Image: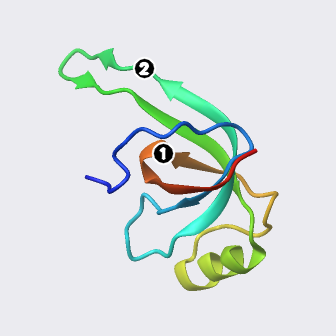
Amino acid sequence: SYRAHHIKMKYKKGDIVLVQSAAGKAIPKFHVRLLEKIVVPASKGRFMDWHGYTTWKATPIYQKEVDMLRKQWRISFDKANEDLTFINEEDIIKKIKTN
């Protein structure tokens, strides 16, 4: 999907970013701290080629958002700054704070 932030941003470990869930736009945006960058290179398959992508291991940072996502959307978060999730770089909306 085309995003307004199509210009490649540089993110680094510790950055706090606002993200949109890959599960759909109906799920409210939430804030995470980026913990570890994972780059998967493009590869050729037997029947099709796979594009490369960048994802981040991250943790949600606000308990209020964690509680809302769990109660209203059944997303299995419990504790801010402890739970882990994976965020595709294309789902990052904007950088809030740099490490």
Residue 69 sits in which quadrant?
A: bottom right
Q: Residue at x 38, y 52 (%)?
A: 5
The residue depicted at 62 percent of the width and 33 percent of the height is 37
Q: Is residue 73 above or below residue 32?
A: below
| Callout 1: SS | strand
Horizontal relation, residue 40 to residue 12: left or right: left
Density class for disc 1 (Cα within 10 Å; few <14, some 14-19, many ≥20) is some
Which disc is residue 7 wearing?
none
Residue 42 screen position, x and y as percent: 35, 20
Residue 95 left/right relative to 16: left
Image quadrant holding the C terminus, namely top right
Report which residue position mark 1 lands on.
Answer: 88
Q: Residue at x 64, y 67 (%)?
A: 76
Q: Secondary structure at mark 2?
A: loop
Image quadrant in which you'd find residue 48: top left
Q: Which mark is residue 41?
A: 2
* Amino acid at circle 1: Asn
- x, y percentage for residue 45? 27, 17
In the figure, is residue 99 to the left or right of 49? right
Q: Mark 1 or mark 2, which is nearer the start of the sequence?
A: 2
Where is 98 relative to 71, above or below? above
Crowding at dot 2, Cα within 10 Å, few <14 / some 14-19 / many 20+, comes out as: few
x, y percent for residue 52: 38, 26
Q: CA distance from mark 2 to mark 1?
A: 14 Å
